[in-house]
Image (tube, grey):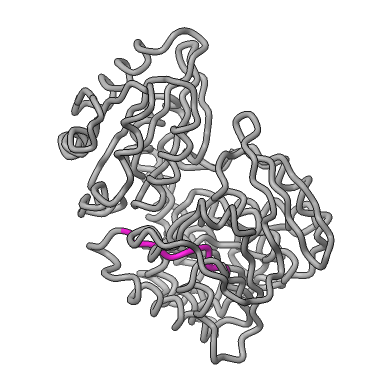
Amino acid sequence: PTIVAVRLVVAMLLGRLAGRLSRLVGRGGSAVPGLVAEAVDPRVIEKLSARIPDGVVVVTGTNGKTTTTKMLTSILERAGHRVIANTTGSNLVRGIATRLIEVAGLRSGIEGDLAVFEVDEAALRVLAPRVRPRLVVVTNLARDQLDRFGELLTTAGHIESALAHSGAAVLNADDELVAGLADGTDLAVRHYGAVEEIRAAMPSDAALYADEEPRPHGRNLDVVLTAAVPAGDGVRIGLVADGTEVGAALRVPGAYNGYNAAAATSAARALGVDLDTAPPALEAMPPAFGRGQVIPYRDRNVRLLLVKNPAGFNQAIRLLGSAEPAPVLVVINDRDADGRDVSWLWDARVEDLAGTAHRFGASGIRAADMGLRFKYAGVEAWVEDDVGAALDRAVADAPEGGDIHVVPTYTAMLEVLHLLLPDTARRETWT
């Protein structure tokens, strides 16, 4: 037992030291501590997660993980919980290990009573047996990073295997693949969804490619999204549970964030939190890093809309369709965190942008690919490989006080944020 305890302490100390050194050389520090600690003690996650009194909640799915995790954390904190969350957005196993190292005492204790972790879909199958989650929340499943995940049924299988190690689940009933993940099991399941008109604006993967109408799912819903109306920079939503309706003015845009709010509210209810706690917590929550964030820059407003796959890109396109004419810069990278395969650009409804009065530009490592996609969609656009130069061009095209829409992939978002907020872009935060 003494050797086991010493190994854990050494793993934590070396992990923390590695993180400090990584940040000193400008490389961030959200994954290195976990990598080092697990090399010293492969059971560091099991040992530290076992210290969390009220257990671990994980949020997974193709889109909405970060925002749903932040929404749920906000609700739980308003209810009085001290929540441990991976606020850097590092959602692989090493990122979870890093966060646990940061909040755990060397010998005992931990800085929180409940953990809410955003977890990558493929990483979940490995992490779930290690943390034995009290609750798994699944937002949706769509084609994403084919080089990593392959076909959707493979991703669904990863999540389904993880559910066998969980106590309960909150599932999106409007996504057929998600809704049925726990069928035939003894798992305690809550489903959430939306009224038909909102469902039509949020097609499942099958509907996205086949242009199908949403079909009734016939499941009892714990929380129903009844309204999602644009309001300023955000969206005003309505939620119904047990016959009671509440409303909230979210500071993030789009009907898809209404779905995220429904998921977070249903998860909070599964954890024993009253419905009335959700609205004020949701209204107080600022946008997560790069997801609907508005950043003042050179007397303009830069609006960031992260995209990673056709479903997410289509929602960004939908938002742009209702926005006032402005410069739009799409920044596409193909690094590991983005996915090496950018064929997904051809599955998004870029043609819908041809009817808008926006001015378009493309940048990033795969700027030429995006430029070609614009060309085939009938959208006039300029191409500039250098992200800094492209941002300067977009800014120059906007009047003082005007908007600039930047639509980046993940690592492109980090590059843009390094230009906009050089003191914070190396370490993703929620604040």
| Coordinates of residue 327 in the picture (x, y in percent) | 37, 21
As drawn, is 230 to the left or to the right of 354? right
Quadrant location of residue 76? bottom right
Across the whole image, how many numbered discs are drawn on residues? 0
Position of the C terminus by quadrant: top right
As drawn, is 169 to the left or to the right of 176? right
Q: Is residue 24 magenta?
A: no
As drawn, is 191 to the left or to the right of 60? right
Nearer to us in this view, 213 or 398: 213
The relative height of residue 184 versus residue 258 in the rendered view (above or below) is below
The relative height of residue 11 versus residue 78 in the rendered view (above or below) is below
Residue at 43 percent of width and 22 percent of height: 404
| Coordinates of residue 323 in the picture (x, y in percent) | 49, 27
The kind of secondary structure the magenta stretch mainly shows is loop
Residue range corresponding to the magenta coloring: 137-144
| Coordinates of residue 201 in the picture (x, y in percent) | 51, 51
As drawn, is 392 to the left or to the right of 373? right
The relative height of residue 248 versus residue 361 in the rendered view (above or below) is below
Residue at 55 percent of width and 62 percent of height: 117
Nearer to us in this view, 209 or 384: 209
Residue at 34 percent of width and 51 percent of height: 310
| Coordinates of residue 320 in the picture (x, y in percent) | 44, 33
Name the residue at the top extreme: 400
